[in-house]
Structures are given as C-alpha cells and as structure tokens.
Image (tube, rainbow, N blue to C red):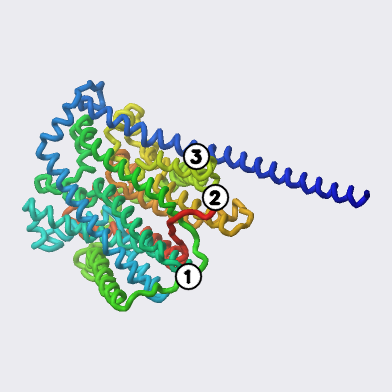
C-alpha cells in the first residue's frame, strides 16, 4: 500500500507541475499579448498623425481652391482639369518618368551581376568589393552632387563644352539624366550588392541552392519597385543645381510641388498633382509589404562566414568581366568628387584661405553644424527610435496575434516609400495655423516614425523567432531579440540621421530663418550669393562635410567587413507551427 501511495503521490505531483507550467505559459502568453499591443499602438498612432491624416487632407485639398492662408472653397474637378491641360505639368511628369526609367535600368542588372561575381571570390577579396562598392553610398549627398555639377558646368571653373549644353533644353535634359543615372548606379550598387550577397550567402551556408533563384528574383522585384517609388519623388540634386532650367525641362514633380504650394500658393493644383503619385507609390508600398509577408522573407544572423559560391567556369568568367565593368562605373560615379577636390588641393591660385575665412565669418557655420547633427540626433533618439523599435518588437517578436501579427505591416506599407513633401499640400495650412513653419517642432513631424526601419527590424525579429523555434531551446527575450538586434538598429539609426540632415527641400521650407538652417539649406543659399567664388564654396563644403563623411565611411566599412557578411536573408515557409 505504501508503494502504491507513493506512486500516486508522484503522479499527482507531476500532474501539478504540468498544470503549473501550463499556467505559467498562459500567463507569459497573456503578458506577451498585452505588451505586444502596447508596443504597436503608439506606432499606429504616429502613422495616423504624420501620414494618414496629411494624406486624407491632400486628397481633400485637391478638390478645393488654391489658398492655404485663407478659407478655401470646393471647386470639384477643376484642379485636375488644369493639371491635365497644362503643358508645363506634362513636361514635369515626362522628365520625372525619364528619370525613373533611367534609375530602374541602373538598379535592374548591375548590382545583381556585381553580387554574383563577388560571391565567387575569396572572403578577403569579397570584402574589398563590398567596401569599394559602398564608397558612393558613403559620400552620397544631393547637395554635394549639386555643388559638384555646378563646377562641371561652370564656364570659368569647369568644362566649356558641358556649359554649352546648358542653354539647349533637349541637351540639358539628357545630360542631367545621364549624370543622375551614373550617380544613382554608384548608390544602387552598394545597396544592391549588400542585399543580394545576404541572400546568396544564406543559401550557401545552409547547403541548399533550391530557393536561391526564387530569393534573388523576389529581391530584384522589391528593389525595382522601391526604385520606381523613390525615383518618382527624385530629382533633388538636379533641381537644386538647375532650378528646372532651361525652360523647366529639368524640373521633376517632387520640387515642383513645393513651387506650386509656396511660390504660387496653389495648394489645390499641387494636391491634384501629387494625388496620383500618392496612389501609385502607396500601391507600390502595399505590394512590397504583401510580397514580404507572403514570401516569409526574414533577416537573421548567419552562423559562419560563407564560402565562395561555386559557378560554372564560363559563368564565372562572364560575371568577373561584368563585375570589373561595374566597379569601373562605380569609380566613374565618384570621379567628379575626386577630381574636383584634388584640383582644389593642387591649384593654390583657385583657393584663397583669406577668402575662405571671410566666407566663414559671414555665415553662422557653427550654429548650422549644431542644427544639422544635434537636432536630428535628438529627434531620432527621443522620438523616432522608441516608437519604431517598439512597434517592430511588438509585431515581429511579441506577436500578440500569433503569425497573423505580421499582417499589421500592411497598415504601414502604403507609406513605406512616401517622402514628406508629397503630403505638403495637405499639411501646409495646418503647419501655418499652428505656427510650425519656422521651427524644429514642425521640422520633426515627418520623422516621428521611420517606416522603412520598422519593416527592416520586424523582418529581423521574424528571423530570430524562426531561429529560436528551429533551435528547440527556451527563448530568452533580451538575449535572442534585444541584444542581437542592436547592430542592425545602430546602422538603421545612422542611415536615418543621414536622411534627415540631407532632406534639402523640406528643410528649406520649414527651417527658413538663418539661425535654424542646416547645412544643405545653408549651402543652397550661399551658393547663390557667392556663385563667382565657387572655389571657396567647394572648399568650404569639403571642410565642413569631410568629418561627417569620414565618420559615416568608417561606420559603413566596419559593417561591410564585420556585420553585413554575417547577416542573412531567407524566404520560404517556417518549420514551426
């Protein structure tokens, strides 16, 4: 009897322990659901405030009269009729379309060929290609391009042949399309190479190449769609340099919206102009979000460095040739910077240190530097990072609605690629009435939440969830999610800061007073005042921009050598249920 009692007691104890574990799991899951919802709601609130409401107001404004400082009236489809009948707007859309096609051609094949060629190299050579291809990425700045092109087309400091093209509308249009395409190729090569290599290495490490082709096709589609969406809002550097001249043949839609809204106070027509773009770019963002969810694309840390990908001999030779050609084109894309700065160093007659000191004494350079870097850092660290990171953590890690939580990304997807000025016709009146047109509070509104960062971190947390499930171990939230996501979060923050301090047109509109200027705004102003002293202007830009360029270069080089080779991209179904 004593043995039977002891056996029954042990069974009861085991049963109680099982119930306790089940209860603990239920409590943990309940807490996980509550925290997940709490983390996601602020991000949705920020989306409503900064994106959804301005979008709705922009559509409403497109059916109203053109006045944002006074009470406007409903005018039906009048603004759309003006838009479709205006030759100038047709010309603006035409140049924007050509710019988009040019950039798509630059991103469609070269980065993929570069990645395939680099994947067959030894790790040391592969890292060299990574770093070299990222040089345009490190130094890219619309204002920098504008200043360099200004030198190239100057009859005094640049090429008289190139300067002669500026007077002919057709020649100027195609010349700037070629220059922008070359510059964009350098930028796209570094980004595309990093993305494609992450997918190639992931399949190589796992020992399976079955899904590699599907993964690369998916990534090509996503990058092309993203390029189309962003190029429809592009042309900052071109318009900053030419102001649309000659004859508005180099004007794109994005800056023309600013001209209509503020120079002519035609917010109704500007809203009608931007509404079709909002719909197109919103649909592109939604499709990309849908592709990411349905393909189960995820980011994760690779367990080891990938070995070179074995290729057929003829394919390896072909990719090597094309890769060398790609590297040469990247060098060409950065050559204007290199040549110009080299000439500034060796041609002492062109730069007068006395003149440079005079220029520095005439502008609030230290105040501008503080505005350029400190203000974005405050915005990003205090507002953008908590909202974005917690939102991604809620959707990708805590998953309050299980795997269905990832469908919440579709709420944010339509605004994945939309830049701030596309919504300015709907924001202008509110900003004016709230007196936010010349202050950092108004400047910060579009950057309260970073939707691309939200997607990237969510995909990473999705990968970590899969990794933890595959390992069969007990997940530790801080170790498996927070700690491992820090490197990716840091590089996302760096790119966010670079984006904010290079948003030329929005900064020009909102930070209108000299004491609130940031560097791109300042250089745009003094470029017009000191156009004849272009040597000193370039020297000044080099002096104040160089420390930031060096710092960003160091960060990106470290990531390309240490972190990005260990970051993988995979698609396909999860094994766990």
Element carrying mark 2: loop
Question: Which one is earlier in the sequence, the residue at label 1 or at label 3?
Answer: 3
Question: Which one is earlier in the sequence, the residue at label 2 or at label 1?
Answer: 1
- Identified at 31% across, 64% down, the residue is 112
Q: Are marks 2 and 3 in contact (CB under 8 Å)?
A: no
Q: CA distance from mark 2 to mark 3?
A: 23 Å
Q: Are marks 1 and 3 in contact (CB under 8 Å)?
A: no
Pair 2/1: label in front:
2
- Identified at 31% across, 43% down, the residue is 419
Q: Is residue 431 above or below residue 291?
A: above
One can see residue 302 in this view: yes
Query: Which one is nearer the viewer's eye here, 309 or 337?
Result: 309
Q: Is residue 138 above or below residue 122?
A: above
Q: Is residue 400 above or below residue 427?
A: below
Question: Which one is earlier in the sequence, the residue at label 2 or at label 3?
Answer: 3
Location of residue 62 in the rendering, given as x and y in whole percent from the top left corner: 23, 29
Query: Which one is nearer the viewer's eye here, 94 or 502?
Result: 94
Q: Residues within 10 Å of mark 3 (few under 14, many from 20)?
A: many
Location of residue 474 in the rendering, given as x and y in whole percent from the top left corner: 64, 54
Query: Residue 512's mark?
Result: none
Query: Which one is nearer the viewer's eye here, 143 or 423?
Result: 423
Query: Residue 40's mark?
Result: 3
Element carrying mark 1: loop
Horizontal relation, residue 512 to residue 212: left or right: left
Residue beneath label 1, please?
Answer: 305
Query: Residue 577's mark?
Result: 2
């Amino acid at each position: 009897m004593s043995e039977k009692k002891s056996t029954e007691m042990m069974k009861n104890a085991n049963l109680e322990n099982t119930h306790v574990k089940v209860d603990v799991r239920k409590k943990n899951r309940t807490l996980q659901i509550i925290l997940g919802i709490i983390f996601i709601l602020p991000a949705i609130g920020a989306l409503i405030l900064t994106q959804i409401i301005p979008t709705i107001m922009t559509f409403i404004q497109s059916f109203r009269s053109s006045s944002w400082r006074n009470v406007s009236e409903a005018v039906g489809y009048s603004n759309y009729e003006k838009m479709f009948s205006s030759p100038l707007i047709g010309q603006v859309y035409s140049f924007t379309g050509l710019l988009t096609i040019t950039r798509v051609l630059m991103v469609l094949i070269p980065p993929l060929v570069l990645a395939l060629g680099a994947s067959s190299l030894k790790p040391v050579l592969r890292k060299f290609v990574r770093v070299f291809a990222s040089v345009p990425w490190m130094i890219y700045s619309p204002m920098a391009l504008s200043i360099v092109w200004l030198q190239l087309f100057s009859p005094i400091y640049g090429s008289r042949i190139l300067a002669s093209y500026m007077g002919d509308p057709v020649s100027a249009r195609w010349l700037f399309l070629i220059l922008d395409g070359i510059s964009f190729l350098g930028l796209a090569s570094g980004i595309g190479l990093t993305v494609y290599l992450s997918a190639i290495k992931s399949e190589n490490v796992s020992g399976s190449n079955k899904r590699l082709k599907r993964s690369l096709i998916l990534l090509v589609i996503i990058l092309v769609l993203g390029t189309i969406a962003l190029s429809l809002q592009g042309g900052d550097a071109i318009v900053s340099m030419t102001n649309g001249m000659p004859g508005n043949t180099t004007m794109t839609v994005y800056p023309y919206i600013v001209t209509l809204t503020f120079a002519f106070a035609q917010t109704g027509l500007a809203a009608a102009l931007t509404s079709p773009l909002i719909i197109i770019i919103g649909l592109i963002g939604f499709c990309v979000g849908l592709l990411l969810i349905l393909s189960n694309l995820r980011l994760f840390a690779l367990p080891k460095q990938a070995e070179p990908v074995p290729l057929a001999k003829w394919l390896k030779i072909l990719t090597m040739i094309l890769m060398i050609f790609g590297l040469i084109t990247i060098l060409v894309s950065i050559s204007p910077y290199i040549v110009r700065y080299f000439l500034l160093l060796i041609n002492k007659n062109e730069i007068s240190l006395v003149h440079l000191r005079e220029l520095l004494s005439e502008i609030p350079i230290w105040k501008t530097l503080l505005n350029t870097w400190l203000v974005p850092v405050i915005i990003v660290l205090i507002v953008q990072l908590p909202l974005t990171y917690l939102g991604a953590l809620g959707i990708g890690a805590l998953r309050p609605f299980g795997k269905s939580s990832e469908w919440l990304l579709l709420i944010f997807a339509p605004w994945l690629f939309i830049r701030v000025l596309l919504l300015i016709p709907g924001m202008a009146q509110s900003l004016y009435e709230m007196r936010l047109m010349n202050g950092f509070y108004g400047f910060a509104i579009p950057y309260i939440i970073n939707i691309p960062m939200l997607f990237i971190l969510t995909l990473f947390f999705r990968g970590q969830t899969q990794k933890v499930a595959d390992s069969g171990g007990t997940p530790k939230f801080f170790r498996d999610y927070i700690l491992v996501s820090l490197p990716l979060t840091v590089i996302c923050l760096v790119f966010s800061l670079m984006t904010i301090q290079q948003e030329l047109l929005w900064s020009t509109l909102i930070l209108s007073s000299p004491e609130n200027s940031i560097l791109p705004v300042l250089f745009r102003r003094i470029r017009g005042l000191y156009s004849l002293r272009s040597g000193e202007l370039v020297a000044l830009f080099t002096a104040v921009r160089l420390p930031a360029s060096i710092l960003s270069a160091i960060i990106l080089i470290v990531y390309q050598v240490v972190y990005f080779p260990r970051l993988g991209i995979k698609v396909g179904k999860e094994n766990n249920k």
